[in-house]
Each structure stands twice: as structure tokens, then as C-alpha cells.
Amino acid sequence: MSEIAPVKRAGIWLWLPLALFVGFFVLVMVGLLRPADRDVASAFVGKPLPAFDLRASIPGRPGLKTADFADGKPRLLNVFASWCIPCIAEAPQLDALARAGVEIHGVAIRDRQEDVQRFLAQNGNPYTRIGADDLRAVQLAIGSSGVPETFVIDGKGVIRHQHIGDIRVEDIPKLLEKLREAGA
């Protein structure tokens, strides 16, 4: 009888790695299958844009400054880069918003003029103005940590909404709603 007890205890320990693996697998699958929450509470929503004056990112388009947002009209501020793959993915949605009459200003992050021009030639140019933010100073000052990010700015230059990541087709109605709210 004394020989059977150690075998039973050893059997439990043999199943432990499998049980741990199954538990880990379940956690990973729950994380992958649950949709990501793209709404992030930003400390900058409800605050005015910081003062900035960016040089033009490309010839033929004006640069971008804080005063461009204080004319009474809500608009989008899109932070992007030519080297950003998700920025390419959101280009058709930005184009659709621009065709719908939404004014979009862009901030090109750490980019060379020729790279921005090539990006816009390949993916379209929905921007009215594009400022060059070579040191990411404006990007960080508005609470953006990556590219792409899009902000709804009201007609007084106040940040009303922050969309993190690329804009997808299903995001367009929410952005249009936030723009309507910002114009009210």
C-alpha cells in the first residue's frame, strides 16, 4: 500500500503542466476574441490646443498653427507619418470624410518632405493644411503617443474627442457625430 500513494501524488504533478497550458491558452483566446476598446479617456479632451506654429510639410500646402482652429468651424486633426502602415490603411476613410465635407488638418511626424509627398501621391491627400512636427513637440503636447491618431477640434480650438489608431469604416459615423456635437 505504501507504494501506491507516491504514484498517485506523482500523477497529479504530471497533469499540472497541461493544466497550466490550458489556462494560459484560454486567457490568450479571450484576449484575442474580445474586441479592443478604442475609447481612451484622454486628459487633453476638453482642453484647448497648445500654442504651435508648424512649417508646411509639403510645398503648395500651408503649414499649421493653433489659430487655424479658432474660426468657429469644427474639424479633424490627424496625426500621421509616411512610414506608418496603419496610416495607409486609414487613408480611404480620411478621403471619404474629406469628400463628405469634413475639413482635415494633418500633422506629419518625424518625416521628410519627399516622403510625405510620396505618401500623399500614393494614398491621396485629404488634408487642407499639413504641418511638419519634426521633434514630435505638438504630438506630445496634445496627448498623442503614436500614429495615427485623430482629434475632433471644435471651432474655438478645444479638443473634443481623441480617436487612437487608424480610422476604420465603422468609426466614420462616430467621428461625424463628434464633429456635429463639436459644432453645436
Image (tube, grey):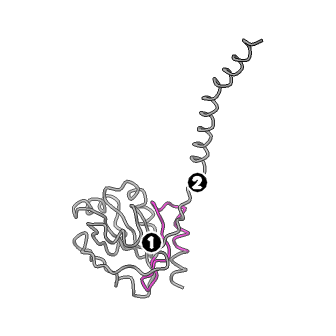
Q: Is residue 115 above or below residue 153?
A: above
* Residue furthest out toward the front: 2
On the picture, is 26 further left or further right than 46?
right
Where disc 1 sits, the SS reads strand
Q: Residue at x 45, y 60 (%)?
A: 165
Q: Which residues are magenta?
A: 153-177
Residue 22 in the image: above or below residue 144: above
Left/right placement of residue 17 relative to residue 122 reads: right
Q: Nearer the viewer, residue 21 or 101?
A: 21
Compare marks 1 and 2 and give the one earlier in the sequence.
2
Q: Is residue 62 left or right of residue 184?
A: left
Q: Quadrant of residue 131?
A: bottom left
Q: Which mark is residue 151?
A: 1
Taking the magenta stretch, the answer to whether it contains residue 92 is: no
Q: Amino acid at mark 2?
A: Pro
Magenta-drawn stretch contains 155: yes
* Residue at 78% in and 12% down: 1
Tell me residue 79's x, y (percent). Answer: 37, 67
Which circle marks residue 116 in the picture? none
- Viewer-side residue, 135 vs 76: 135
**Label 2's element?**
loop
Q: Residues within 10 Å of mark 1 (few under 14, many from 20)?
A: many
Where residue 182 appears, x then y in whole percent? 51, 81
Label 2, on which residue? 35
Q: Name the residue rendered at 25%, 73% in the picture.
A: 56
